[in-house]
Amino acid sequence: MSKSNALTVTLADENSSIYAELLRQLLDCPNWNDSSNSNRFKCDLYLGERNNLPFSQLSIFVNNKKLLVNYYRGSNVICKKCQLVRSLRFFKLDKSNWLPTSFIVSPGRANCDDRSDLQLFMSQGSRACIVKATSGAKGDGIFITDDYSRVIDHVEQQKSSFVVQEYITDPLLLPNGKRKFDIRCWVVVTDKFEAFFYKKGVVRTCSEPYDMHDFSNKVSHLSNHCLQEELSENFGKYEINNEIFFDEFEAILKESFCFELSRICEELKSVAALCLSCIKDKCRIYPDESMQFFQVFGFDYMLDVNGNVYLLEINGAPACAEKLKTEFVTDLIALQINPFFGLGDLKCPSNFEQILLHDF
Ligand code: ADP
């Protein structure tokens, strides 16, 4: 039944677990009606699909109302793999110790891409690299090699550009099974372009021991959840769903390596702050007073054996670990949705911590 004088929310993304949950929680309270199936552009909150946002239709209906949309225009410059490298280069951050050395290689661009630098890099002590398509996701098509010709032969058969990146060969391994892992953290950028780091993250584990001698063994080298689930019989053997949450991770780091999760989190935050600072101006070049934006970003990191942090990629439309989803979305509502629409109190939920962005 529709509620009178309620705000309206449209969900136009079938695939986002975060926004499906957001819709569910909003409709549970008296302030919201669902406009997804009628007047979908005439709403207060539009939860769209990242690559398919109907800004012109939305702007027709806004008038004097406030419309909030769940993606920043311009944020793609850090969410596609090649563009991330380019953006970091532009701000002279690409040589940062937290970014594995990265090269952009494009089919048919032998004279103007990074392949000669890559060749030099790979020839020095036959270094291994990981090859990723710029818009790739979920480990799809990724491979690891120390053979430069193989990289070039592969890229030349494709249509899109690739990031060819130093492979971190000495990852920190979980003591139980000597397995590799990556770390996913969520950061919300609010309509005021303030960034908030979510203190609860998730470690995504490989199902098989790390095998330095066989780069073709994907389940030992790529910690992507879907790939592990699809390819390994051991999926879920060590941890439910191949996930470790921060409380447990903190204990593992301390007991097995004498590392403090708090120190590592400081580095994760500082990397996120630098990357988001790169898009500040890009996201502000669309001064559209009728529409305001916010965005949830997923930052993927890994650690090496010395506890150094590396940024792997930034996801502009991340999923949320099932176990954290309900609480994350409740916190997101308290952080962004309620204050924007003048509902609830303005206190920052305790799971979020503001990270200060830079002015470059
Ligand atoms: P995708 O978007 O396909 O998930 P990622 O960049 O996140 O691509 O890489 C997938 C996985 O490959 C990561 O989760 C990690 O396990 C591994 N990986 C990625 N980059 C590196 C790297 N530079 N060194 C070592 N392992 C890496």
Image (tube, rainbow, N blue to C red):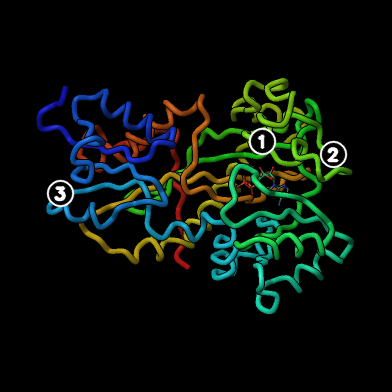
**Residue at 40% in and 65% down:** 281
Mark number for residue 65? 3
Q: Position of residue 339 (x, y in %)?
A: 26, 40
Q: CA distance from mark 1 to mark 2?
A: 17 Å
The answer to whether one can see residue 47 in this image is yes
Counting residues from the N terminus, which is met first, the one under dot 1 or under dot 3? 3
Label 3 secondary element: loop
Place residue 291 in its image quadrant: bottom left
Counting residues from the N terminus, which is met first, the one under dot 1 or under dot 2? 2
- Would you place residue 42 above or below residue 275 in this image? above
Q: Residues within 10 Å of mark 2 (few under 14, many from 20)?
A: some
**Residue at 37% in and 58% down:** 73
Q: CA distance from mark 2 to mark 3?
A: 57 Å
Residue beneath disc 2: 211
Label 2 secondary element: loop
Q: Residues within 10 Å of mark 3 (few under 14, many from 20)?
A: few
- Would you place residue 26 above or below residue 283 in this image? above
Q: Position of residue 343 (x, y in %)?
A: 21, 35
Residue beneath disc 1: 227
